Image: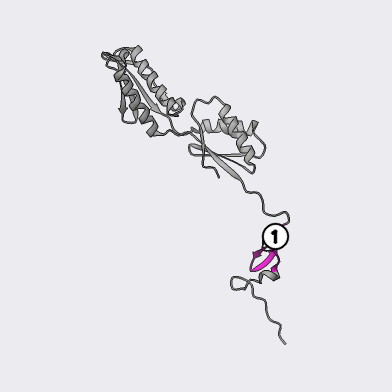
Amino acid sequence: MQEPTEQVGPTAKSPSASSCGPLHARRWHNGRHTQAPAGGPMASESSFDVVSKVDRQEVDNALNQAAKEVRQRFDFKNTDASIKWSGEAIEMEAVSEDRVNAVLDVFQTKLARRGVNLKALDAGEPRQSGKVWKITAVTKEGIKTEDAKKVAKLIRDEGPKGVKTQVQGEELRVSSKSRDDLQTVQKMIRDQDYDFAVQFENYR
């Protein structure tokens, strides 16, 4: 009498749970159940991204508040002081270098109160243009490759063992099997006096 042949591959029927034992201890391989490696599943990695972003809406709110204060303050009276958008840049004007610097100070104060890191603002030097003085400022977003490498080197040299980094465009991915180690890395980065703003997002 011919013995029945065992089916394998996609058409094979999986044995019942009772004949397999605990499901977590077995897995399918080429149509057959095989015992999973001892020790259980490997710990998955957690990660976050180091980014440098600016909330454009908060910058706009700060600009509008600064413009209102400049119009109302007595020490700006008859100085033609103003602040406004000029494309993607922010243009500040006044009749003297002192007053245009004062406009910048008002704007920076409003930014800080709205939670915008002042390192994200790149303000140029005052310059005279005809009868007025001007300051042009732009917001900075994204981490330059060389800056991302600086952060990665800090983590590699001083951070916990096993923490990995990867430059991804204008961001830096940081990953580890230990969430505590990731928190340690975040504190390390915060404690550095980088000349660019940093935030942490995309927690996984």
In which image quadrant can residue 21 be found?
A: bottom right
* Amino acid tagged 1: Ala
50 or 81: which is nearer to us?
A: 81
Quadrant location of the N terminus in the rendered image:
bottom right
Q: Magenta stretch?
A: 20-37
Q: Quadrant of residue 173?
A: top right
Q: Is 175 placed left or right of 131 in the picture?
A: right
- Decide: few, some or many residues near mark 1? Use Cα within 10 Å; few <14, some 14-19, many ≥20: some
Q: Measuring 67% from the left and 37% from the top, which residue is drawn there? A: 161
- Residue 159 in the image: state x and y as whole percent: 64, 33
Residue ID at (71%, 85%): 2
Q: Quadrant of residue 7?
A: bottom right
Q: Tell me the residue that label 1 is attached to.
A: 36
| Residue situated furthest bottom in the rendering | 1
Q: Is residue 34 magenta?
A: yes
Q: Element at badge 1?
A: loop
* Percent x, y of residue 116: 44, 29
Please indicate, yes or no, whether residue 126 appears anywhere in the rendered image. Answer: no
Q: Compared to 108, does 28 lie above or below?
A: below
Residue lying at 65% horizontally and 31% vertically, measured from the top left? 158
Residue 151 magenta-drawn?
no
Residue 70 horizontal side relative to residue 113, left or right: left
x then y, percent, for residue 64: 33, 27
Q: Is residue 48 above or below residue 43?
A: above
- Residue 29 in the image: above or below residue 195: below
Where residue 78 sits in the image (x, y, percent)? 26, 13
